[in-house]
Image (cartoon, rainbow, N blue to C red):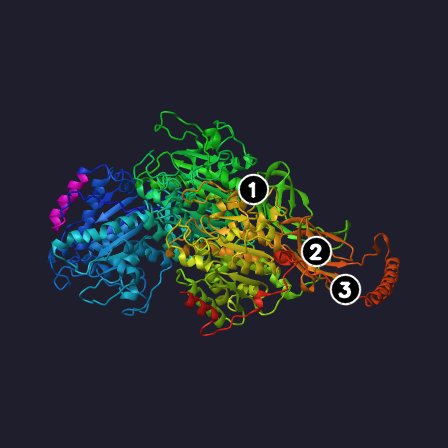
Amino acid sequence: TAIKMTKLLFFKLAHAKKICCSVVALNLHRYYNYDQLTDLLRSLAQKHANIANLTSIGRSVENRELWVMRVTRDPAADGPGKPKFKYVGNMHGDETVSRQVLIYLLEHLLEKYGEEPRVTELLDTTDIYIMPTMNPDGFEKAKEGDCMGKDEGRNNARNVDLNRSFPDQFEEIDENAEDMPEVTAVMRWILENKFVLSGNLHGGTVVASYPFDDSAAHDNEGTYSRSPDDALFRYLARVYAENNPVMKTGQPKCEEDINETFEDGITNGAKWYDVAGGMQDFNYLKGGCLEITMELSCCKYPPSTQLKTEWDNNREALLAYMEKVIHIGVRGFVRAARNDAPLADAVIMVAGINHNVSTSRFGDYYRLLLPGTYNITVLAPGCKQRWRARAVSANPQDFRHHHYNDMKLFLQKFSSEYSSITRLYSIGKSVQERSLWVMEISDNPGVHEFGEPEFKYIGNMHGNEVVGRELLLNLIEYLCRNYGTDPEITQLINSTRIHIMPSMNPDGYEVSQEGDASGVQGRNNTNNYDLNRNFPDRFNFVKDPRQPETLAVMNWAKSYPFVLSANLHGGSLVVNYPFDDSPDNLSRYSKSSDDDVFRMVALAYSQENSKMYDGHSCKGMNLYQEYFKDGITNGAEWYNVHGGMQDWNYINTNCFEVTIELGCYKYPPAADLPKYWEQNRRSLLKFIHQVHRGVKGVVIDSKDGSGIPNATITVDTINHPITSNVAGDYWRLLVPGKYHLTASAQGYSSVSTFVNVPKEGVEIVNFTLNRIHSYTNGQTIEDTTPVLDPSVKEFQSLIKQLSGESGLDKLIKDTPTQSSFRYRRYSEVSEFLRGLTLNFPEITSLQSLGQSVEFRTIWALEISNNPKVQEPSEPKIRFVAGIHGNAPVGTELLLEFAASLCINYGKNTAITRLINETRIVILPSINPDGRELAKEKDCTSTAGKTNVHGKDLDNDFFGNASQRAAEPQPETRAVMDLIQERGFTLSVALDGGSVLVTYPYDKPVQSVENADTLRYLASVYANHHPKMHSGDTACPNSQMGTIPNGVLRAAEWHSHMGSMKDFSVDFGHCPEITVYTSCCLFPPAEMLPTLWGENRKSLLSMLVEVHKGIRGVVRDKNGKPIVGAIIVLNGGVRVFTSEGGYFHALLAPGLHNIEAVADGYQQQSQKVSVSPFEAASSVIIEFDMENDIFGLPRELVVASAAAAMTALVVTAFIIWCVCSAKSNRQKDGFHRLRQHQDDYDDEIHLMSMGSKKSLLSHEFQDESESDEDTLYTNKL
């Protein structure tokens, strides 16, 4: 006969929530003797006949009944489907606490059935047997107050120790059955019933002891005797110990041995001390029942006044042991395949565990197992052997509502316990400074693995919609506990980088109320803004200021290559997909380009939730009965939502997001949480699986095999391109079908291909793109980029790495700063800069550019690996601050920036290489006089804005004398001279009063030749700032509203003439952006660490960006460099070659035209491609001599010019002879120079191609008292 085996996989773990149990009318201050106990048990059985049945399994030596109360629904019936559990107490008659707590447990279960869901479910699903006393004779002899067991009562009436009288595996037990009828009765009881789990309650210390109780050697103590189910027994023991406040400490502090300790409150029996003939080993070896021994109290027979304490200590442990343990592992039925008849006593064998259980007479079996994958074999007499591999999953154990601090501890606990697969991080803070925690779960946490998609869940966006918050905590626990044992979970974590944010609105949650079914208290954040109406919207302008929670999530979403996401809400039961609003604000279907994909992933969730899939969302709760076919809906068709998060994700990132409404009750009672978990567990997992649908692959550069970042992947029939990650890998969700895909990238030829997307899984499609060759004078030429030496290749690789998603984040993590921020006045700034040069003389040089009106030095600090040598091949970047003395934040940021670079030089590879390849010039304070007048903590004061002459220095940079009403201020002159040295590739100026970046021009002009590049440079800074890129300045009294991407042309904000950035562009040929670091001009010093944290990444990004664009050398055919050649960019902006013929210009990503012009040479033109992720490629321009001059052959023109020169020389000689004969009056007939020549000096000087004077050539000399100090002291 074949075996038919059925296995049930829907086991429930008991609710982890500790429900406060209100005590019924228990007498907790007296012991019950045998007669009193008998009366009580009979009374309880009669009162609760529907769930209680009292029987005797035998009699003691003195003819007392061995009472057992069976507690379960329908106790008189016997059938399959409920595992059997037993508690046995008072085996040693003088260990009495066990007897009493089992009486109290009985009363509690019987009285609370039907009232408490926890107790009701336990009795409905479990067949519970409770024997309060196995040794009633011994109890009658014991004496109250005997803590050490010195009096009689331990043994039975024949002086037999009942826990040394069971058959033993290691030795023969020589006891007469007539002397121990109690043991005989219990053995028969165990063998007749298929008990699954048991607890044997004792006293004398506080510990949970597990098999084996003895060993073959029978050493008195110290020998660990391991059973085949040792790990399972340890788990069972810990379940009890963890729920007993004394036992879990592992330090019972019993008087008999006050220093005795037990790790985790548990011990192996034989290791503690050897016990032969114990009951727990007999249960396991002969009865197939797993039993542990619980020692409940130090005092064996404590005074009755202590009973309440003992009940309080053990109540939760007794319940938890039953409910958490009895329903783990594997259970099912074994039936004959021929006629479906149950097979009794079929043997259930687990491969690798030498311990079997057997089926009951109904064919049902229960095999307790820890989470894992097992091969299970079934044997039955006369039947063929059958086996199956089964996975057993560990369900969450912590079902309760978690307030913020509780949630934080929960996350920290799992992050610590499962550190190999988790990383806990915060993406920002709420209005009330609560961290927005995210738990990353991956087999390689903290790292984006090439080709691995990233997924996110967000919960509790509306603070009073709490089910999502708790489900995500349950999911974290479920994933962690089952990794490595459950194949599905293990594969999911190994192949996916999962990010889970349980609460986006922790502030709102804290003011919400349990039991709120449909209210709004706590829905919004502390500022009373609905976070799901706070994102930029494609159809409607969102006027509300962007909230910190919103900004944090926006920044987070753009920082990781998320592919799929879900936002968990409450109030209905449906999966809602984009779009959430429509152009005309009508409730109608608003289809996205990926409508089919969204329907696919939405159905994946709803189909696993039968209640949701039914479509009738809130039966009985709403007057208007909503119906959603298949449990999904288009957002706008349901109702319009402006500023929603899911639409923003789809439009602004590569991430597809849906909104999942988990139930109609927004803040349900905690007792309902297990039900929500069971309804949504499979859905939550199935939805994560959807991230592995469609196509994925990598876009590769054909020349060097590297990945191409930011490549665009388009599908011919879907108007929604996605882009590749920094390593070139990409993911594109698609429904099954045939598609035509195209990959393209700036500077590369596009490639297209057809692909069939399978019904299950993902199709891998890789693209290899060829670089577009340069074009010279309209002719295509081969890519002549020279073969790079390893050092250059290594640096280019570094730039690419730092340009990636987490490159700068890692750099910041590797270079922590420990400064104590404060504001420094002029003298302290000077001392700080001098300190840098004294401590880091090899990489720093400090120069004076000039002095302010009050004779304070305008300092310039250069940081480079060779600061005293001009290196025209290296890009040069300028950082400037303090042009307005009342905005000193920039000064402090640049000082910290300089210190950070110096300190990490030689320690961090990236910092070292950046300094070696860059000339960094830092001007921390242009207006030191104004800074001395500024008022700290004054956000709007103009004191110190100007210099002491009352001149706003940012209105004083004029290149033409005709535009200037007066001489430039000394501070302005010092900076103008520096700018006119040229050689700078990029300049970044820091100011205050807002949170944005502006680019030239400040003056009102109709158009800007290189606006794309200037805007791009500004956006690079803003995009690396956690707040700026959102465009919401959040500044009080700001009239600007939202600024797209946090970037603005300066004239559109505060238009004025004579700005430093305009002068830099026009006369220094160097692009300059102005960064406004904070709304407050002079914020409190305690804000400086935050501002440093916000701007540090952006400042570093500028050091990386200065190495991009185009760079190269101009030379003639003989290899001689051409100095002063003009490089014209896109027909407009000009840069000039420096010594060695070098040039470097920053350009926005894309394809650009460059033209090279030099006197006497033929004009050259090329098209070059600029990447946002790669260092500038070297461009070599070689000039040919001009063959024609004025349209005539060069040889003819040269000969004619020589003849003409000879004639002129002869004529001049004749004239001189004639003139020398004239009178003395005519000898000095030379005219005076024009009187007003000086009026034009400034203009000539400023209009010259470049100053010959290098103000940076005067090194700072360390003197005890400088001339400057003397002048300043005299002035005071």
Q: Position of residue 551 (x, y in %)?
A: 45, 45
Is 36 colored magenta in this rendering? yes
Is 584 colored magenta in this rendering? no
Q: State whether residue 819 is above or below residue 555.
A: below
Q: Which quadrant holds residue 71?
A: top left
Asked whether, in this view, residue 157 is left or right of residue 568, the answer is left
For marks 2 and 1, the one nearer the N-term is 1
Q: Disc 3 or disc 1, which is closer to the eye? A: 3
Which label belongs to residue 503?
none
Tell me the amino acid under the disc marked 2: Ile
Which label belongs to residue 1126?
2
Q: State whether residue 848 is above or below residue 724.
A: below
Q: CA distance from mark 3 to mark 1?
A: 94 Å
Q: Tag 1: Cα neighbours inside 10 Å, few (<14), some, or many (≥20)? A: many
Residue visible at 24% across and 66% down in the picture: 260
SS for callout 3:
helix
Q: CA distance from mark 2 to mark 3?
A: 47 Å
Tell me the amino acid under the disc marked 3: Gln
The answer to whether residue 361 shows anywhere in this view is no
The answer to whether residue 642 shows anywhere in this view is yes
Q: State whether residue 866 is above or below residue 548.
A: below
SS for callout 1:
loop
Asked whether, in this view, residue 426 is left or right of residue 860, the answer is left
Q: Which residue is mark 3?
A: 1226
Asked whether, in this view, residue 444 is left or right of residue 1147, the answer is left
SS for callout 2:
strand
Magenta stretch: give its range: 28-46
Q: Which residue is mark 1?
A: 733
Tell me the amino acid under the disc marked 1: Leu
Query: In terms of depth relative to the viewer, which is nearer, 953 or 159?
Result: 953
Q: Position of residue 486 (x, y in %)?
A: 45, 51
Q: State whether residue 1187 is above or below residue 23.
A: below
